Amino acid sequence: MPDGTTTNEQQLTITDSAAARIEKLRQIEGKDGLMLRITVNGGGCSGFQYAFDLDDKTTDEDITFTHNGAAVVTDEISMGLLAGCVVDFKNELGAAFFQIDNPNATSSCGCGASFSV
């Protein structure tokens, strides 16, 4: 497991970098309750694709994970494909993005936005 991470009993890990970026987005948007919502949808070039949104509401079907005060939320169906994943934020030359390291994926596309199991 990467340093500076928190994992809860449902096995979704949020890195310090991802938590810091979520906090930065909260500040930019001016919403203290803002969370990163991760959803897994059918599609993409490998069968499933990740969708990232900012949300300030949850439903009864949602599962929320926190690390360093930042929250990531997903639904129960997506959690079946996200269990054991690491949510990270990369800030590289020419790109800044949330990245999922998914041990359940048997393959993924070149951009890392879609995967198969």
Image (tube, rainbow, N blue to C red):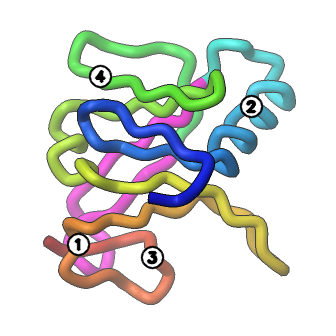
CA separation in Å, label 2 and label 1? 28 Å
The residue sitting at 24% across, 11% down in the picture is 60
Mark 4 or mark 2, which has the lower sequence index?
2
Say which amino acid is labelled 4.
Answer: Asp
Would you name the residue on which mark 3 appears?
A: 112
Would you name the residue on which mark 4 appears?
A: 62
Q: Secondary structure at mark 3?
A: loop
Mark 4 or mark 1, which has the lower sequence index?
4
Say if 26 sits above or below 47 in the image.
above
Say if 11 sits above or below 55 in the image.
below
Q: Secondary structure at mark 1?
A: loop
Q: Nearer the viewer, mark 3 or mark 2?
A: 2
**Magenta portion: prevailing SS class:** strand
Say if 3 sits above or below 106 in the image.
above
Would you name the residue on which mark 1 appears?
A: 105
Number of marks present in the image shown:
4
Magenta region, residue range: 35-52
Q: Nearer the viewer, mark 4 or mark 1?
A: 1
Would you name the residue on which mark 2 appears?
A: 23
The residue sitting at 43% across, 55% down in the picture is 86
